[in-house]
Amino acid sequence: MYPSRFRYEAPRTLGEAISLLRDGGEDAKVLAGGQSLVPLMKLRFASPSLLVDINNIGGLGYHRRDPDGTIRVGALCRHADLERSDLLKASQPTMAAAAPLIADPIVRNRGTLVGSLCHADPQGDWAAVILALGGSVVAEGPAGRRAIPMAGFVTGPFQNALRHDEIAVEAVIPAPAGTPAGGYLKLERRVGDFATVGVAVAIETSGGVVSRAGIALTGVGAATIGAAEAAAALTGQPLSEETIAAAARLAAAAAQPRTDHRGSAEYKRHMVGVFVRRILSRVNGSGAGAGAAGQERAA
């Protein structure tokens, strides 16, 4: 099947891109990596009248750490850039664990983290990671820039908080106040598949106590789920078998899975608890260092 007819524009500045989106109305779409939008267009699940390709806009392919420790990921930073990033491996273990598990090498070479967040797929990996880290998305439009917390960015399945004339220009991960640790695990039927269950855990420790915790789930609800009660059970406590078990139990309770061809709701909920326990146990066993939870696929 071929896409419906559309107008194609490739602006060279953000200002030009925003003007095109403003004039194009609700039917205009932004193209960055194209790994989600193009397949939808080929199947005619999406039929934009205008496609605004931002790949010719310079200065959006970065990922960097500010002097205060804040990490910024530009709209054209590819998954593969993050997979190979020494910066993430040294300073952001949850992101470093997730990056190699995104889809397959072809998708990772073209797809973008920011584009994945905007796509808002309930089975997408990055939304859970950025939510667990307390991150946000920076949008730019005719009125200027605004930061949208990840907790409010995804508004439903394949829906986000962007206005039709805004472009998501970067994702921002706040600087940790303590020593960062964590990881990401996903259950998939085969390598490169969407997550049947995905769990992101991001904690910070100081003086042997968890000073901040974030736990988020993917694939087990109509949208990415923040397991706030599970995170709260860790905050202010040392990591121990008891606190890890409590967090795992509460995270499983926060899941909202449905029985389908990938597995029963009970099985998926059970795997949420298993993954939370596995990530935190690795962190605890390694002394909660930056690289505590390793990269792993669960099949």
Image (cartoon, rainbow, N blue to C red):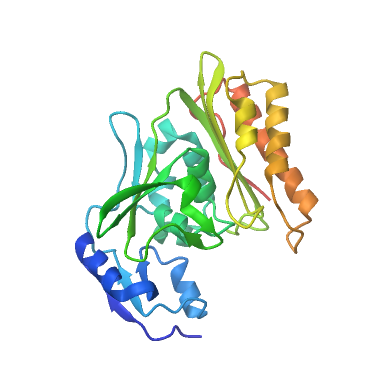
In-image side of 23 versus 120 (left or right): left
Q: Residue at x 40, y 77 (%)?
A: 48
In-image side of 186 versus 84 (left or right): right
User: On the image, which quarter does residue 24 sit in?
Assistant: bottom left
The one of 183 and 173 positioned closer to us in this rendering: 173
Is 17 placed above or below 88 here? below
Q: Residue furthest front?
A: 143
Q: Residue at x 56, y 40 (%)?
A: 295
Q: Residue at x 32, y 49 (%)?
A: 146
Residue 273 locus on image (x, y percent): 71, 39
Residue 152 locus on image (x, y percent): 48, 49
Is 156 placed above or below 83 here? below
Residue 107 locus on image (x, y percent): 46, 61
Q: Residue furthest top?
A: 207
Q: Is residue 103 visible?
A: no
Q: Residue at x 47, y 41 (%)?
A: 95
Is 198 placed above or below 239 here? below
In-image side of 33 versus 272 (left or right): left
Residue 106 locus on image (x, y percent): 46, 62
In-image side of 125 versus 276 (left or right): left
Is 154 placed above or below 37 here? above
Q: Is residue 45 visible?
A: yes
How many numbered markers are drawn?
A: 0
